[in-house]
Image: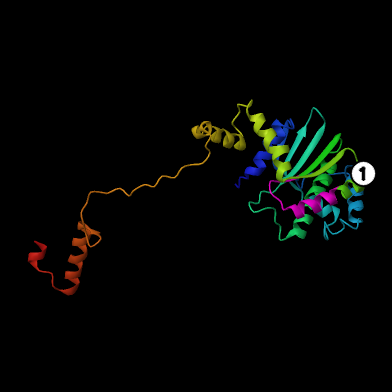
């Protein structure tokens, strides 16, 4: 099973910062689930509005509503029962920065995930007071971020619902909004059952942190000597075996050599 540290981080964020009491990573639909026209009504209306928009009509490509819902997968879903709100978060952790085969495809995929998550939540989690669909990535180029942020404003006008919140959380905002509050919450949290929490606790155990150093000093170690003598780069036993074999192959091995 593949373990994603970023998804585990978002899991902990939803639990400790957003106070979600029900959280699921790698959330998927089941073919056994049945939905009614009433369940799908709001989601279908939004899907049509997005498909008819000049800016977003290519986001879903040739997928219709039913195909989109059947492909449903959300990296992390969290439900805050106290505030009657639900979070659907997709996360991408690309070391060199978000890249889905170039800037244009990256932008398309971000919006496809954000929109699809909203449609899924409207269909399968109808009745909540607040829907939150976020795309989270610690590193994205400024060009892509700026284009997405501009399009997000346009998308909000099309959606035109106070109960629906969409957002891209990346770069500095990622650390200020998600990472830092989560680390702060761990100071009062003693449950280390979560993967990301355990990783942070492991770092905090490093005694060098108290000395103001976070880097590991690399000491050059000299190769240890086994104390065994060598001949022509070979240990004595290897040297004898090598030459005895050569004598045997050449037919010059005598009884005196064996003795």
Residue 161 position in % (x across, y down): 91, 41
- Quarter of the image where one finds residue 64: bottom right
Q: Which of 44 and 162 is in front in this view?
A: 162
Residue 113 position in % (x across, y down): 78, 50
Q: Mark 1 points at which residue?
A: 160
Q: Residue furthest toward the bottom?
A: 250
Helix, strand or loop at label 1? It is loop
- Quarter of the image where one finds residue 19: top right
- Taking the image as shown, residue 50 lies to the left or right of residue 2, namely right
Give the answer, above or below, for where 55 lies relative to 131.
below
Q: Residue at x 69, y 31 (%)?
A: 16
Q: Nearer the viewer, residue 116 or 204?
A: 204
Magenta range: 135-152
- Quarter of the image where one finds residue 247: bottom left
Q: Nearer the viewer, residue 139 or 87?
A: 139
- Taking the image as shown, residue 139 lies to the left or right of residue 257, namely right
Residue 59 position in % (x across, y down): 83, 56
Q: Nearer the viewer, residue 8 or 166?
A: 166
Give the answer, above or below, for where 198 lies relative to 170.
above
Q: How many marks?
A: 1
Residue 122: in magenta span: no
Q: Most prominent secondary structure in the magenta stretch?
A: helix
């Amino acid at each position: 099973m593949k373990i994603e540290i970023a998804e585990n981080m978002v899991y902990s964020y939803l639990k400790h910062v957003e106070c979600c009491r029900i959280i699921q990573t790698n959330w998927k639909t089941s073919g056994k689930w049945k939905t009614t026209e009433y369940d799908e009504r709001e989601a279908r209306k939004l899907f049509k509005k997005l498909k008819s928009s000049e800016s977003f009509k290519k986001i879903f490509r040739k997928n219709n509503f039913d195909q989109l819902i059947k492909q449903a997968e959300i990296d992390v879903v969290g439900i805050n029962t106290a505030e009657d709100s639900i979070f659907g978060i997709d996360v991408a952790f690309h070391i060199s920065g978000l890249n889905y085969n170039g800037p244009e495809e990256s932008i398309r995929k971000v919006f496809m995930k954000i929109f699809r998550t909203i449609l899924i939540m409207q269909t399968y989690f109808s009745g909540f007071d607040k829907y939150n669909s976020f795309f989270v990535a610690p590193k994205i180029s400024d060009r892509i971020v700026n284009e997405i942020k501009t399009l997000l404003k346009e998308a909000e006008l099309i959606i035109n619902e106070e109960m629906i919140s969409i957002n891209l959380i990346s770069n500095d905002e990622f650390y200020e909004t998600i990472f830092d509050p989560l680390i702060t919450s761990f100071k009062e949290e003693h449950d280390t059952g979560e993967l990301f929490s355990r990783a942070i606790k492991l770092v905090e155990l490093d005694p060098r942190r108290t000395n103001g150093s976070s880097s590991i000093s690399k000491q050059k170690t000299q190769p240890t000597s086994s104390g065994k003598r060598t001949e022509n780069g070979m240990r004595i036993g290897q040297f004898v075996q090598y030459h005895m074999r050569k004598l045997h192959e050449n037919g010059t091995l005598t009884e005196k050599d064996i003795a």
